[in-house]
C-alpha cells in the first residue's frame, strides 16, 4: 500500500463511525452560510476543537467571516488559514464544478476530502413538492456526482437510509443533535399548536383542514405556522377567517431568525406530518429536536425518520389520516398527563441520541 493509502486507512475508520485526527490542525468547511445542515450536524462536532482550527469558505470559495460571538474554534481571520497536509476539507451538501477544481488544484496541500449530505440529491431533484428554484443546486451536485464520489475520501450521511443510497467505500452515519440540551422553558402551552416547516407544500395542505376543524371545536386553541409561497397564502386566508389573534402566520425565516422564533414561542404541541416519498424517507428526525427545543409534545408521521427506535417509545406516530391527527391534537390539549408523558418521550429519545452520538473527530481536544 502507498504512503497515501496508508494515511487514508488511518484517517477513515468508517466501521467505527469516526475520522481519526491525530495529526490534523485545520478543518475547512465549504458551504452556504448560514446553513441549517451545518448547525444541526457538523457544528456540534466542532465545539471542543482547538482554537482557530475551523475555517469556513462560502460556495464561491471566498472566506466567510464568523460572528464575534462564535466559538473560539473558528478562525476570526480566515484569510490567514493556509492549506497544508494537516488540513481536512469538508464540502457541505451542494457541489459546484469550481469546488472540485479547487480541490484538484490544492490536493497536495490537503490531507483528506469529506462530503457531508443530509438529503438524497437525486430524490430532491425528482420530488414534485420541491420548487424548481430549490432544485438548481441539487441538479448541479448530481451533474458532478461521479467526479465527487471518485474524489472524496469519505462520505458523511445523516441517516442509514441515505447512506445506503450512496455508493462509496467509506461512509459514516451522523444523526442530527440537540446540543446543548436546553432546560424546559416552563412556558409551553398545550393549547398552542405549531407547525414549523416552510417548504413542505403537501404537508401544509394536509394540515390546513385539520387545523380549521380543531380550531372550530376548541375556542382556546392557538396555532402558529411558518410557511412560504402558496402555502403561506393559504394559511393567511384561513387566518382571516379564524382571526390573526388565534392563527399566527410567519413567512420564511433566516436560520438565525428561525432559532430566535423558537425561543420566543410558547407552543406546547409541535406537528411533524411527512408525505411518504423517497426524499422524505431518507431524511432525519430534526423536527423531534425542534419539539424538544420548544418544550412541546410532538405528533409525528408514522414513517422511518421518526420511528427508527420502534413504536414503543412513548411518542405518538400517526398515519396520514386527518381524523387521527385531529383526535391526537384534541387529546393532547385536554389531557395534561398525556401531554407531559408525550413531551417527555421525545426529550428522552433526544438525550438517548445525544448520548450515543458518534464523535466525528474523536482524537481532537482543545
Image: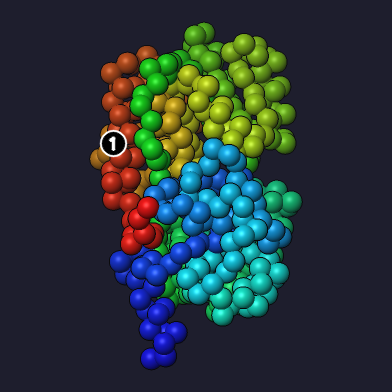
Residue 35 screen position, x and y as percent: 59, 47
Residue 304 screen position, x and y as percent: 40, 50
90 on left or right of 252: left
Looking at the image, residue 145 lies above or below residue 208: below
Which residue is at the far bottom? 1
Total marks in image: 1
| Colour convention of the picture | rainbow
Q: Can residue 330 be seen by looking at this rendering?
A: no
- The residue where tag 1 is placed is 348
Looking at the image, residue 60 lies above or below residue 297: below
Residue 30: image quadrant is bottom right
* Residue at image point 41% right, 53% down: 49
* Residue at image point 46% right, 64% down: 25
* Residue at image point 36% right, 59% down: 364
Residue 249: image quadrant is top right
Residue 160 screen position, x and y as percent: 39, 60
Which residue is at the far top? 219
Q: Residues within 10 Å of mark 1 (few under 14, many from 20)?
A: some
359 on left or right of 262: left
148 on left or right of 342: right
Q: Toward the viewer: 291 or 216?
A: 291
Q: Quadrant of the N terminus?
A: bottom left
Q: Toward the viewer: 204 or 79?
A: 79
Looking at the image, residue 264 lies above or below residue 163: above
Q: Toward the viewer: 274 or 107?
A: 107
Q: Can residue 314 be seen by looking at this rendering?
A: yes
Residue 272 screen position, x and y as percent: 48, 36
* Residue at image point 70% right, 15% down: 240
Label 1: state its secondary structure.
helix
Amino acid at each position: 500500500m502507498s504512503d497515501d493509502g496508508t494515511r487514508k486507512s488511518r484517517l477513515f475508520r468508517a466501521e467505527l463511525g469516526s475520522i481519526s485526527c491525530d495529526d490534523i490542525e485545520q478543518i475547512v468547511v465549504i458551504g452556504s452560510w448560514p446553513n441549517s445542515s451545518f448547525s444541526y450536524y457538523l457544528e456540534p462536532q466542532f465545539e471542543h476543537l482547538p482554537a482557530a482550527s475551523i475555517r469556513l469558505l462560502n460556495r464561491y470559495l471566498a472566506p466567510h467571516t464568523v460572528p464575534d460571538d462564535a466559538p473560539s474554534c473558528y478562525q476570526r481571520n480566515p484569510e490567514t488559514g493556509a492549506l497544508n497536509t494537516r488540513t481536512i476539507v469538508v464540502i457541505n451538501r451542494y457541489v459546484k464544478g469550481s469546488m472540485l477544481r479547487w480541490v484538484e488544484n490544492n490536493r497536495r496541500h490537503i490531507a483528506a476530502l469529506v462530503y457531508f449530505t443530509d438529503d438524497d440529491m437525486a430524490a430532491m431533484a425528482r420530488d414534485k413538492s420541491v420548487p424548481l428554484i430549490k432544485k438548481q443546486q441539487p441538479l448541479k451536485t448530481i451533474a458532478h456526482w461521479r467526479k465527487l464520489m471518485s474524489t472524496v475520501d469519505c462520505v458523511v450521511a445523516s441517516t442509514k437510509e441515505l447512506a445506503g443510497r450512496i455508493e462509496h467505500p467509506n461512509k459514516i452515519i451522523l444523526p442530527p443533535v440537540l446540543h446543548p440540551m436546553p432546560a424546559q422553558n416552563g412556558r409551553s402551552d398545550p393549547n398552542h399548536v405549531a407547525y414549523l416547516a416552510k417548504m413542505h407544500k403537501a404537508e401544509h395542505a394536509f394540515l390546513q383542514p385539520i387545523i380549521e376543524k380543531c380550531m372550530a371545536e376548541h375556542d382556546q386553541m392557538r396555532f402558529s405556522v411558518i410557511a412560504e409561497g402558496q402555502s403561506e397564502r393559504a394559511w393567511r386566508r384561513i387566518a382571516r377567517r379564524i382571526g390573526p389573534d388565534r392563527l399566527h402566520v410567519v413567512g420564511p425565516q433566516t436560520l438565525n431568525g428561525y432559532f430566535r422564533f423558537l425561543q420566543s414561542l410558547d407552543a406546547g404541541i409541535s406537528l411533524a406530518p411527512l408525505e411518504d416519498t423517497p426524499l422524505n424517507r431518507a431524511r432525519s428526525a430534526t423536527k423531534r429536536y425542534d419539539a424538544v427545543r420548544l418544550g412541546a409534545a410532538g405528533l409525528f408521521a408514522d414513517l422511518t425518520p421518526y420511528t427508527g427506535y420502534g413504536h414503543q417509545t412513548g411518542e405518538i406516530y400517526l398515519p396520514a389520516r386527518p381524523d387521527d391527527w385531529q383526535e391526537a391534537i384534541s387529546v393532547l390539549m385536554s389531557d395534561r398527563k398525556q401531554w407531559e408523558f408525550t413531551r417527555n418521550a421525545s426529550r428522552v429519545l433526544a438525550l438517548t441520541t445525544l448520548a450515543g452520538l458518534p464523535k466525528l473527530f474523536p482524537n481532537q481536544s482543545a
